Image (cartoon, rainbow, N blue to C red):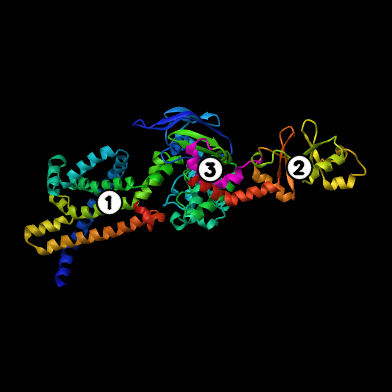
Amino acid sequence: MLKFDYVTKVYSGGKKAVEDLKLEVEQGEFVVIIGPSGCGKTTTMKMINRLIEPSEGSIYIKGENILHKNQVELRRSIGYVIQQIGLFPHMTIMENIALVPKLLKWPEDRRKNRAEELLKLVNMNPEYLYRYPHELSGGQQQRIGVLRALAADPPLILMDEPFGALDPITRESLQEEFKNLQQSLGKTIIFVTHDMDEALKLADRIVIMREGKLVQVGTPDEILRNPANEFVEEFIGKERLIQARPNIQTVGQVMNPNPVTISVDKSLSASIQLMKERRVDTLLVVDERNILQGYIDVEILDQNRKKAQQVGDVLETDIYAVKKEDLLRDTIRKILKKGMKYVPVVDDENRLDGIVTRANLVDIVYDSIWGEEDAFANQDQ
Amino acid sequence: MQALKQFLAENGDELLLKTWEHLYISLIAVLLGILVAIPLGILLSRTPKAAGLVMGVVGVVQTFPSLAILAFFIPILGVGTGPAIVALFLYSVLPILRNTYTGIRGVNQGLLEAGRGMGMNGWQRIRYVEVPLAMPIIMAGIRLSTVYLIGWATLASFIGAGGLGDFIFNGLNLFRTDYIVAGAVPVTLLALITDFFLGLLEKWVTPKGIRDSKEAVV
């Protein structure tokens, strides 16, 4: 959808704002560019609609080099939401929303219908159409700012710290509203901010920049799990990293790697022996290649001890397993929801890797309540 | 009161005619001033470096004594209404030019960038953003200019352009106070009334959304 091909921007005076930037954005992706002030994030964004011309390299939208396109037409085909809202105070809400359609010479009634339709999208009464921006609250104004960018239905929208000027409560509700809107409309968004919480909340992918270069590009989870370097770590903040831990930990990190297993060809008496020894009520059943076959528990043994001889005859094969790379948070949810006592962990070929039990859950809860204090204590030392 | 009635009976027609002359000399000069100063002001707002120079030159012209300017145009343009209008026009330019320039430059940069980013071309930014937002300031310049010009237009009579100045100069030559008053009072009234109507015009051309908000001046 959007591709930066080794783009460099040098300002007159020799300051390199952006250096050799290479980035690809998929259709429908929500990309947040973040970094400290002066890192080149705004420059990067403004090169997309050529408010700033790149010094080197090229930028492609849907395979077309935008540097060869007419500037004005290019901008009309890209939505733009600026910092500090930027509604025109002398135009009504309708005129503001339908500005790009007007530039594109849509007839009047089509512009009006479009403006009404968009207002409905954010649950605002159509009577606002004839009001002026100064009659609206900050949150409403920024909603209009977003609608204005959507007016001509552009596939790509650029947003330059759009929620920065709002109070925290309005900002939060607007972020949520906007994220839902973006997902339902399937727009591609390039969003610039310096607020990490905002980035983590909205982004499909976060692009961290510093001094004109990309430092790390990844999903919020990836970045929280593996910050590329100290700068990223610091930029995210220790506190956020700790808070995020339960959300980004994988099953592999907490599972018990040595579950109690038994092979298919063992006898039932051997299995009861094993249970007694290891103080468990369930055994995972594997074959000789350690591939998970099912389980037997003490109940099954009790019912079948007279009828059958081998584990393979009685095992329960209907078993739910997770993978090592799965997020712990999803796994926990499933364990709790399905009322399972444990869940086996397997690899791609269904080989048994470990097990997550309710005892592991206790560890996690303990960590998220007291672990933070421990971490801070360590930090102090 | 009796004297006033008698004066009007004798000079009423003359007075009306002179008032009309006065008004149209002034208004034509202002109109020309608007036609030149507003586009020039917009142009200068694009080139701040040239703006200082042009503004300086116009400022210097403004300081020339008006009588001198009028006299100066006699050898070039002769006498009569034409030269008077040209001279007054020169005076009308500066206030309008300066206010247009200041008004346009004062338009919020963020709004301009919003306009640019949404794909307005240069002309559309002027038409839809800059001029409407600068309108209150431009209008203030026009009002100021007009009131000045109505005052200065009295001097036009000096080069035979007519207007209420005729009464004042006659009064001065004949030591007739009543003629001086008959010229001065209508000039003042004319200035006040014109200003009032321009005030209405200002309200009418100022976009509704910024009429009662502070945004107008930013």
Residue B13 shows up from this direction: no
Q: Is residue A356 above or below residue A25?
A: below
Are discs 1 and 3 both within one chain? no
Specify whether residue A45 is painted magenta: no
Look at mark 1 in the image and give the residue it sits on: B141
Look at mark 3 in the image and give the residue it sits on: A152
Sequence-wise, the earlier of marks 3 and 2 is 3
Q: Tag 2, which secondary structure?
A: loop
Between A303 and A340, which is closer to the camera in this rendering?
A303
> Residue at (56%, 33%) from the top-left corner?
A1
Identity of the residue furthest to the bottom in this view: B2
Q: Whole-percent x and y of residue B156?
A: 16, 51
Secondary structure predominantly adopted by residues drawn in magenta: helix
> Residue at (82%, 40%) from the top-left corner?
A317
Q: Residues within 10 Å of mark 2 (few under 14, many from 20)?
A: few
Q: Which residues are magenta?
A: A227-251
Mark 3 and mark 2: span between their CA atoms?
A: 48 Å
Q: Tag 3, which secondary structure?
A: loop
Which quadrant is the N terminus of chain B positioned in?
A: bottom left
The mark lying in front, picked from 1 and 2, is 2
Q: Which mark is residue A320?
A: 2
Q: Amino acid at mark 3?
A: Ala
On the rendered structure, is A211 left or right of A305? left
Q: Residues within 10 Å of mark 1 (few under 14, many from 20)?
A: many
